[in-house]
Image: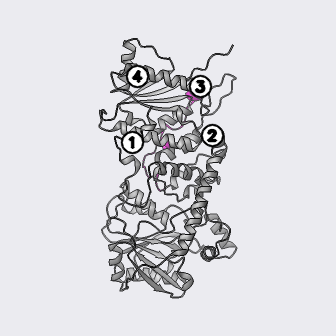
Amino acid sequence: MTEEFQPLIIGFLCRWCASAAADLAGTTRIQYPPTLRPIRVNCSGSVDPIYVLRAFLEGADGVLIGACHPGDCHYINGNLKVRRRVAIIKEVMEALGLEKERLMLEWISTSEAVKFAETVKRFTEKLKKMGPSPLKKSEGDAD
Amino acid sequence: MLIKTITKTVILKSRGSLTETINSFLYLLLEKNALKWLLAPVKDESGLVHPELLSREDDISRINTIAPLIPGENMGTTVSLLTRESPLKEKLGVILRPCESKALVELAKYRQISTENLYVIGVECYGTYHVLKYREMLEEGSNPSEEMLKFFLDRGGDGGFRSSCLVCLTPKPPYSDVNICYLTSWSAGEVVLEIKTDRGLELVKKLGYEAKRKATEGLLREILEERRKEREKFFADAKKELNGVDKLNEFFEECIGCHNCMEVCPICFCKECFFDSERYPYVTRKYLKWRLPEGTVLLPNSKLQFHIGRTIHMGFSCIHCGLCEQACPKEIPLYKFFGLTAERVQKLFNYHPGENLDEKPPIQEFREEEFQEVVG
């Protein structure tokens, strides 16, 4: 019997919004797949492209960046910066025939625990259909 | 300072050879004290050229502006070294090829170059040879400059230029005060100085030149049309060759991780780089984690991390000089990779690196309503 493929998602969650939403999802006991490995960052704008790339090369099937809605950034425009950066990464991935759908940016505010859980659910389903990432070269568990 | 359309030209009549004719202009710049210094490519004994800072007009005869070669680094990098710490106090003229002038503009945007007292004298460029090919040509007794001009006039084959030169669409520096043009005019024994800014006009007036109206340039436009097609084909082929992880791994198979491409890149100016840091290499603990169930350890892909990481970091400002490819000791056709990814990102932002000091790089400005499609 073959086990169903469980994707591994590395999440870079902004401490002012998406990370708090994840906490809220926990305390209100909203269920979502255990595929996400959250990493709290002080601002989504601090997510360097190399974090994303390295996550993929070290075994992630997907990377999720949780950021504040435009206009809500605690540091004025960090979320707009990361959006441009994501646009660049996706364009390069597409140019090189890598699956840009494996990178996801979503606006999740502090109170949007349901949206957070839905996002993880949706992303997990998408990655399950896509299968393991070809960029992944090993089976190790990313910690 | 804004780039203006060419308003005036000065015609220099032949003074013997092409180099002598061009140098007569450079000689006057120093002799009439229009400029204090000149940074220019100087011919050395081996026949190659290297950049030198000159202040005496007697040294002008050693300058060779037309040698189709960028031997080491992009001269934009050299200008950055000269002006990064503090603005120039005295007038410096720098003689730059199109891709070098473009590097200068990008570096100025990132405050790595101060344009105060800096005069850019651009040189028309049809293409440059790989430094090894250039040396080979010298050993065979042929004259690379003449070969380049001959190739320009005949336009047959690929001329053996570097791959980035063959698909280059800027034979004239977009940012400069004066452009030295000779490609179309030299067959009639003339060198044309295109005056592009007020500062440039001031400069030639000091030399006693008379500036006239604009000249025509039909042939160059024709060539650009051809090159535009070549360029599309080049990147379409590159896209096929680099499609997917396996093909990328194959492409970088021989990469030895020397980082030469990064060292020579004029855009990679950071003093501290992630790829030079302690965090970049993988350590034992990580290697052991990557053990496959069958017991084999697949090594992590640091080559892809380096190359893709670099192009994501700086690709939007890539000025397509292709020196990364010339610097590669394993002769990997790197321009295919960096050119393709850079071109895509630049098109995405409709960004034209190196053309205008006022055009902000994509990472220096953000709008609330944009790129909605990348979210979700």
The main secondary structure of the magenta stretch is: loop
Q: CA distance from mark 2 to mark 1?
A: 28 Å
On residue A129, which mark appears? 3
On residue A115, which mark appears? 4
Q: Are marks 1 and 4 in contact (CB under 8 Å)?
A: no
Count residues near mark 4 (Cα–Cα under 10 Å), then give few for <14, some for 14-19, many for 20+: some
Q: Quadrant of the N terminus of chain B?
A: bottom left
| Chain ID, mark 4 | A
x, y (%) of residue B226? 59, 65
> On screen, B363 above or below A26?
below
Q: Secondary structure at mark 3?
A: helix
Residue that sits furthest to the top in the current view? A29
Quickly name the residue at label 2. B244
On residue B370, which mark appears? 1
Q: Amino acid at mark 3?
A: Lys
x, y (%) of residue A109? 34, 26
x, y (%) of residue B326? 59, 58
| Chain ID, mark 2 | B
Can marks 4 and 2 be said to lie on one chain?
A: no
Q: Quadrant of the C terminus of chain B?
A: top left
Residue depicted at 45% across the width and 61% down the height: B102
